Image: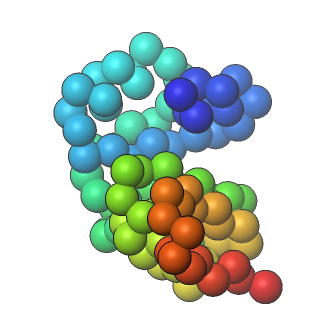
Amino acid sequence: MVANELFEEHEVTVIDKDPEACSRLAEIDVRILQGNAANARLIEAGVKRADMVLTVTGNDEVNAVACITAAHMGVALTIAESRCPETIVKEKS
């Protein structure tokens, strides 16, 4: 849903471990990588050139790790969806 809202005005890369979700995304103009966004797939996705990383998996820890990793790789803005109020994500300043 997020990729569908953003792809017309932005270059979007989606990393998803679900093959069915990746297949559904093939209908819109986004780059699709199957896998876990909290690992080396971020490098393959070109995260070092990204203006923003947005993580919206169903797993708060994966979202946080992916954003922290992206921030350490130089991404200026990272946003992690959190379903648990105790989850803390440090914003890069």
Percent across and percent down for residue 41 are: 34, 61
Q: Which residue is drawn at 71% across and 82% down?
A: 92
Residue 74 sits above or below residue 4 on the image: below
Res. 25 in view: yes
Q: Is residue 21 above or below residue 88?
A: above
Residue at 41% across, 51% down: 57
Q: Where is residue 29 in the image (x, y as percent from the top left)?
A: 53, 23
Q: Is residue 52 left or right of residue 20?
A: right
The quadrant of the picture occupied by the C terminus is bottom right
Foreground: 73 or 19?
A: 19
At horizontal 72% and vertical 67% (from top left) the residue drawn is: 77
Query: Looking at the picture, how far across and down is residue 48, in whole percent?
Result: 57, 69
Please identify the quarter of the rendering in which residue 42 is found: bottom left
Vertical relation: 22 (above or below) 40: above
In the image, residue 46 lies at what x, y percent?
50, 59
Residue 66 in sight: no
